[in-house]
Amino acid sequence: MTRLAIVVLFASLMGPAMAAEAGKPAPAQETAAKTPNSGKSTNSSKVIADILTVSGMKKGLEGLPASFIDGFSSGLEKNEHLSSDLRQAMENSAKEAFTPDGFTGRVIRAMKKDYNEKNYQELLADLSTPVARRMAELEAKDDPSPQEFSAYNTQLGTNPLSAQRTDLLHRLDVASRTSDLMFTSRLIVSKGMMRGMAGANNKCVTEEQLKNAEASMEAKLNANKENMVSLATTILAYTYRDVSDADLTEYLRIYEKENSRHIHEVIYAAIVEEYNQASTRMGRGIMKAVKAKRAAMGDQACEDSAGAPDTVAQARAADADSQAGSAVPSTTPASGDQQAAPAVPKSSIPLEKRKGGDVTQCLEAGSKSDKDIAACAEKFRH
């Protein structure tokens, strides 16, 4: 996964939904279980370290948390419904949950468990070729400014990629699972944050309600599958813009080899698992912060509802996913398929009477007061 893909990924986490495959179990664990481990040796630590270094993956893994925090913080700043103290508490929870050691350590442990001397030496040799080393250098370059990336998109609009080049980039996306990881991590983090916000009063927001909300969130992301694939293709096109088709084809052969695919799946599964663990930790931190804030405000909405869902908590939970962002770079894929953040609808029709309306529309009122939002949400109780 290129550095640029990482940056765009985390900048988009708090923005509009963009999707790829969803709910797809990581096959890496099953594949790893079938790989013989009899080839383990005391040399495994060095070979794994060399693979992560020569591929540029070590630097990428270590940079994941910082990239996430940047995008997360940017998204929080755009959410006018969050108070400054709650915003800071949420940011602190994210910083404590997402750490460089977490991602790097989990990947190394997974590779050691899967380690086979012959297979890992073969991958190291492939990644040490001149073409692969050049690609690693390109992937490690600093990400472009929004203006530079926008200019590149404009260029693609007037000079589109050839069919052969587009096919190579699409195959590289599939083999590297770039768009898969962009979607999966966004979904995981969004769920963690939603549970943190809604779980602030768990006796009112049931597990069934949370699962329904998660299913709805995943469906919305899946509805934008092509946007994510298009974005991933544009990122790869920019990263390898000065690479010939011949060199890109040679590099792609490494990814598409059975041995390489297997080890990459092991790494992919480890990264996804760390997202899961870190997002759970972040959610718990957010829950603690929200509970403290609600207690300080003397919010007793749940106790008065005899177990009915806490409408304010639900509204905040939905807001966490759908309203928090605008941190997506001001660029779109060359295909023009990227979906912009929908404008907040304005209407003189009472919120509770809008067709297809739900409690989250109370957030459209623009009020920064929790009591105002609660009063609006109360109209949805029957």
Image (cartoon, helix red, strand yellow):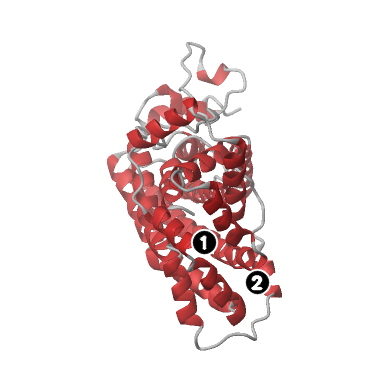
| Horizontal side of residue 324 vs 87, given as left or right | right
Amino acid type at image mark 1 = Ile
| Horizontal side of residue 31 vs 275, given as left or right | right
Instruction: Pick out the residue farthest to the right.
Output: 34
Residue 365, quarter of picture = top left
Say if residue 98 shows up in the picture: no
Which secondary structure, mark 2? helix
- Residue at 50% across / 51% down in the picture? 192
Q: Nearer the viewer, residue 123 or 296?
A: 123
- Residue at 66% across / 57% down in the picture? 25
The correct choice, above or below, for 358 with respect to 149 in the image is: above
Task: Where is residue 19? Give x, y as percent.
Answer: 58, 40
**Residue receiving disc 1:** 271
The correct choice, above or below, for 197 with respect to 379 in the image is: below
- Residue at 55% across / 51% down in the picture? 246
Say if residue 354 shows up in the picture: yes
Task: Where is residue 103? Give x, y as percent.
Answer: 45, 64
Q: Nearer the viewer, residue 69 or 348?
A: 69
**Residue receiving disc 2:** 32
Residue 133, quarter of picture = bottom left
Task: Where is residue 115? Give x, y as percent.
Answer: 58, 78
Which secondary structure, mark 1? helix
